[in-house]
Amino acid sequence: MKRYGAIEGGGTKFVCAVGTSPQDVCAEVRFPTTTPEETLGRAIAFFRENGPVAGLGVACFGPLDPNPASPMFGHILATPKPGWKNADVVGTLQQAFDIPIAFDTDVNGAALAEARWGAAQGCDPVLYLTIGTGIGGGVMVNGRLLHGLLHPEMGHILLPRDHQADPFAGACPFHGDCFEGLASGPALEKRWGAKAETLPPDHPAWDLEAQYIALALVSYILTLSPQRIVLGGGVMQQAHMLPRVRRKVQALLNGYVQMPQVQGEIETYIVLPGLGAQAGVLGALALAMQER
Ligand code: ADP
Ligand code: ZN
């Protein structure tokens, strides 16, 4: 059986692995994200040692260009991360390995992996949303990952809000109070003056947080018509959040979408990732194995 290489490119760490499936991931290595030269150099050294692989998948922080027909394909775009703006990730890897290289966002990779092996098997479209340091969404439609101008930027949508109930100006450097600016982990910390993981379950932060997440999900449900929504990221590790979000989604939809998934069976519709901490690297593996 062919083995594939997976690179999870995160803002703080890179994870590289070789494998064929979640049950068969071997030779995993992780190292901090430093300069593109050093970081990609370590990845290349890893695959030289642990290869050969039939193809590589890179599931990476963005924004990035995932369109193979574009001159900027394989590059990171306007990231504030020092040294990475316009970094040529695929070009650097391609110089070392003459094999197919798939390149997409971390959340698109996670959507594909959850559909293939995780909590969204048999569903299409699938939406994977992470609520962590940033907020981002990946979407699989008709078995393919959604691209277009570039890729979805679902964390930066604008939401209706009550400025009296929540006067916080927002934390997004581009938009202030977009979804990410209101509801990412750092936004919670900035608004409430304490790390999100230290806020108790009865803190008012959580009801407001669930409201913003539910408002966003309702927009995605009404525009993409996903068959399942997978919510990942550190903030969703608060066990009380998922039930709150489900209830608020139902309240906002108000019976309009007449499907059991959003009525009596919402526990099967808005779910946590099935692949847990492995979602990132398995996302990259799924990209490598995707038929293109
Ligand atoms: P990243 O988005 O960088 O990949 P995470 O998904 O872990 O990583 O998100 C990190 C953010 O999530 C931080 O802002 C952190 O405060 C928040 N976070 C992490 N764990 C929890 C938790 N158990 N409860 C609430 N917030 C959390
Ligand atoms: Zn924004």
Image: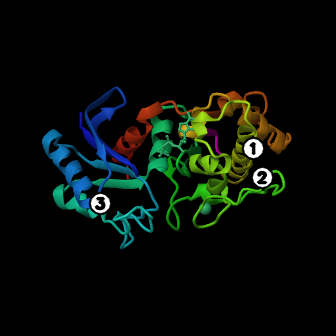
CA distance for labels 1 and 3: 40 Å
Q: What amino acid does circle 1 point to?
A: Leu
Answer whether labels 1 and 2 touch (C-beta < 8 Å). yes
At 78% from the left and 57% from the top, the residue drawn is 160
Q: Where is mark 1, residue-wise?
A: 208
| Magenta residues, start to end | 226-230
Find numbered disc 1 in the image and state the secondary structure of the residue it sits on. helix
Q: Residues within 10 Å of mark 2 (few under 14, many from 20)?
A: few
Q: Residues within 10 Å of mark 3 (few under 14, many from 20)?
A: many
**Nearer to me, 49 or 184:** 184
Q: Where is mark 2, residue-wise?
A: 166
Find numbered disc 3 in the image and state the secondary structure of the residue it sits on. helix
The disc at residue 90 is: 3
Q: What amino acid does circle 2 point to?
A: Asp
Furthest residue toward left: 49
At 19% from the left and 44% from the top, the residue drawn is 46
